[in-house]
Image (tube, helix red, strand yellow):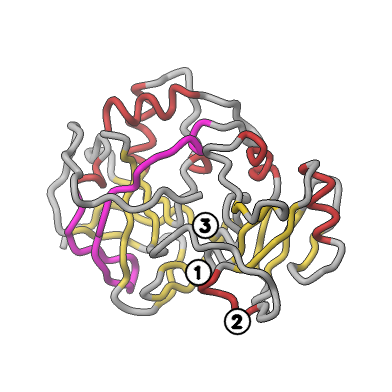
């Protein structure tokens, strides 16, 4: 299996739609990055889970941060507040004050054991595999839209892979159904990542930019990045080699019918 690059960034998002935490190493299982997307923000009056990609009222989510402590506690940083644990009674007040309507944090149905007496957020994701993005794709998007900033944070990957210089285009779209080895963790590339409006919204450090998504739609059939399903538990580390059982270059969009998974934020 040829090496295509190495891991340069690892990310975990304990709370959906919030800015996550960058890691130097992270544990993975067959379900993806351990600790990823355990909680969601919910509008109390409707029970609706936050969707920044489609609802303007939630677009401030990305100015909040989430992290997981060494003992597994999830904490949230609301602007102008200190870090607060998910069970902190003051967290709901901080969230409500920030958004201007009543908001609370709820565990997803799949993680309800963490807060057994809490109301639950409806699961947004049927599966939670690893989301991988390459420097080749980022560079290709930059060449298509030189005025834009395709910062990896727009795309919320778990893994950013720095690929060799001779690997070009939205290369990972050609890896679907291929074996992948991430450090010592083996798996399969199972689907391209379908992109949504989250990629264009303003975040800390870069502006709202609709051309980001327009170019992905034009040249990647709305796909950029891929989902990988590990077949074993393990630990990923920045600097780990990445190998895939495919060729070297992809410059044309692929037909991806049959491989769609829900978009993730």
Quickly name the residue at label 1.
26
Position of residue 90 in the picture relative to residue 167 (left or right) = right
Q: Which residues are magenta?
A: 175-200
Q: CA distance from mark 1 to mark 3?
A: 8 Å
Tell me the element at label 1. Answer: strand
Instruction: Look at 33% across and 38% down and name the residue there.
Output: 137
Quickly name the residue at label 3.
11
Quickly name the residue at label 2.
113
Q: Nearer the viewer, residue 209 or 118?
A: 118
Across and down, in percent, residue 83 comes to 80, 60
Closer to the camera: disc 2 or disc 1?
2
- Crowd band around label 1 with a 10 angstrom C-alpha radius: few (<14), some (14–19), many (20+): some
As for residue 184 lying within the magenta part, the answer is: yes
Q: CA distance from mark 2 to mark 3?
A: 24 Å
Res 28 quadrant in image: bottom left
Across and down, in percent, residue 254 comes to 17, 38
- From the viewer's perspective, is residue 57 above or below residue 40? above
Q: Earlier in the sequence, mark 1 or mark 3?
A: 3
Q: Earlier in the sequence, mark 2 or mark 1?
A: 1
Quadrant assignment for the N terminus: bottom left
Closer to the camera: disc 2 or disc 3?
2
Q: CA distance from mark 2 to mark 1?
A: 22 Å
């Amino acid at each position: 299996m040829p090496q295509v690059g190495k891991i340069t960034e690892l990310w975990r998002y304990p709370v959906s739609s919030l800015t996550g935490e960058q890691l130097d190493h992270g544990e993975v299982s067959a379900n993806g990055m351990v600790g990823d997307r355990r909680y969601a923000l919910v509008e109390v009056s409707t029970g609706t889970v936050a969707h920044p990609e489609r609802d303007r009222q939630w677009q401030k989510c990305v100015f909040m941060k989430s992290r997981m402590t060494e003992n597994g506690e999830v904490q949230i940083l609301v602007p102008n507040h200190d870090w607060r644990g998910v069970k902190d009674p003051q967290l709901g007040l901080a969230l409500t004050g920030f958004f201007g309507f009543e908001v609370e944090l709820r565990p997803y149905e799949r993680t309800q054991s963490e807060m057994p007496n809490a109301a639950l957020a409806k699961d947004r994701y049927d599966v939670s595999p690893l989301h991988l993005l390459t420097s080749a794709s980022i560079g290709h998007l930059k060449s298509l839209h030189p005025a834009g900033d395709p910062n990896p944070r727009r795309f919320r990957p778990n893994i950013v892979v720095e690929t060799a210089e001779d690997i070009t285009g939205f290369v990972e779209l050609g890896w679907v159904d291929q074996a992948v080895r991430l450090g010592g963790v083996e798996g399969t590339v199972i689907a391209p990542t379908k992109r949504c409006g989250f990629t264009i919204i303003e975040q800390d450090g870069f502006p709202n930019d609709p051309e980001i998504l327009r170019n992905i739609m034009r040249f990647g059939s709305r796909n950029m990045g891929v989902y990988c399903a590990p077949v074993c538990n393990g630990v990923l580390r920045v600097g780990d080699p990445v190998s895939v059982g495919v060729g070297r270059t992809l410059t044309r969009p692929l037909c991806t019918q049959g491989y769609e998974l829900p978009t993730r934020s």
